[in-house]
Amino acid sequence: MKRITVLVAASTALLGAFGAGPAGAHPQLVAESKKQGFPAQNCQYCHVSKTPSKSTYKPDDLNDRGKWMMTEKDKQKAKDVKAEWLKDYPGGKEQK
């Protein structure tokens, strides 16, 4: 029984470390976007779902802004998406 408990605890720690569940790195993008003056209120600024999950992520889970951000990531050969790219998002101020 102790072995099972240890395995469960270790698995939980590993899942937490590798970001299983809600996307761990991206909520900071909402805060960073707000700091730069963009009207981001939650993850739906770039995602269709209010609480996207890394484990179930599909490109279809992104709205137009999120898809554009992923295109920028590929164009710039960046490891991560950057909130500063939003200044170049096409459309008027209401689209930013």
Image (cartoon, rainbow, N blue to C red):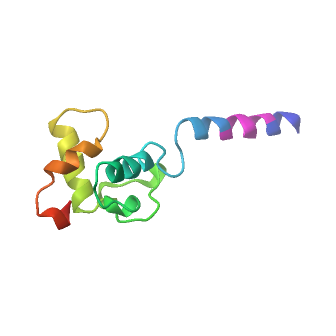
**Residue 20 vertical position relative to residue 62 in the rendered view, above or below:** above
- In this view, the residue in front, 94 or 81, is 94
**Residue at the far right in the pictured view:** 1
- In this view, the residue in front, 25 or 29, is 29
What is the magenta range? 6-12
Question: Was residue 15 drawn as part of the magenta stretch in this picture?
Answer: no
The image quarter containing residue 48 is bottom left
Residue 49 on image: x %, y %: 40, 65
Residue 64 on image: x %, y %: 22, 61
Residue 46 on image: x %, y %: 31, 58
| Residue at x 39% of width, y 62% of height | 41
- In this view, the residue in front, 17 or 93, is 93
The image quarter containing residue 83 is top left
Residue 19 on image: x %, y %: 52, 41
Q: Is residue 19 left or right of residue 9?
A: left
**Residue 4 vertical position relative to residue 36 in the rendered view, above or below:** above
For the N terminus, the image quarter is top right
- In this view, the residue in front, 37 or 69, is 37
